[in-house]
Image (cartoon, helix red, strand yellow):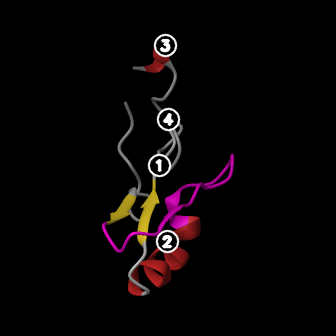
Amino acid sequence: MSAVLPGAEPFDHSGGPVGVLLCHGFTGSPQALRAWADYLAAQDLAVSLPRLPGHGTNLAGSRPDQR
């Protein structure tokens, strides 16, 4: 399995009773929405920004035959 690229890590913040789920696009990673996640967390909202499997990694070594 490929290592997660710097900045592409998932983000979670336990805030108040209202929560927000942010989902990056098909070709993206959490890095694309991190500014929004930080802003919403600063407003005391619970924020979850998961990294979808295979996103935010290097393509080399991601195929089973290349492992």
* Residue type at the position of mark 2: Arg
Q: Residue furthest left?
A: 14
| Mark drawn on residue 51 | 1
Q: Please tell me whether residue 18 belongs to the stretch shown in magenta.
A: yes
Of the image marks 1 and 4, the number of the one nearer the N terminus? 1
Residue topped by disc 3: 65
Q: Residue furthest right?
A: 26
Q: CA distance from mark 3 to mark 2?
A: 33 Å
Q: Pointer 1 and pointer 2: residues touching (CB < 8 Å)?
A: no
Q: CA distance from mark 3 to mark 4?
A: 11 Å
Residue stretch in magenta: 14-31
Front position in the image: 55 or 36: 36
Nearer to us: label 2 or label 4: 2
Nearer to us: label 3 or label 1: 1
Where is residue 19 drawn, in percent x and y?
47, 65
* Residue type at the position of mark 1: Arg
Q: Secondary structure at mark 3?
A: helix
Q: CA distance from mark 1 to mark 4?
A: 18 Å
In percent of the image, x 48 and y 29: which residue is there?
62
Q: Secondary structure at mark 4?
A: loop
Front position in the image: 55 or 49: 49
* Residue type at the position of mark 4: Ala
Residue topped by disc 2: 34
Q: CA distance from mark 3 to mark 1?
A: 23 Å
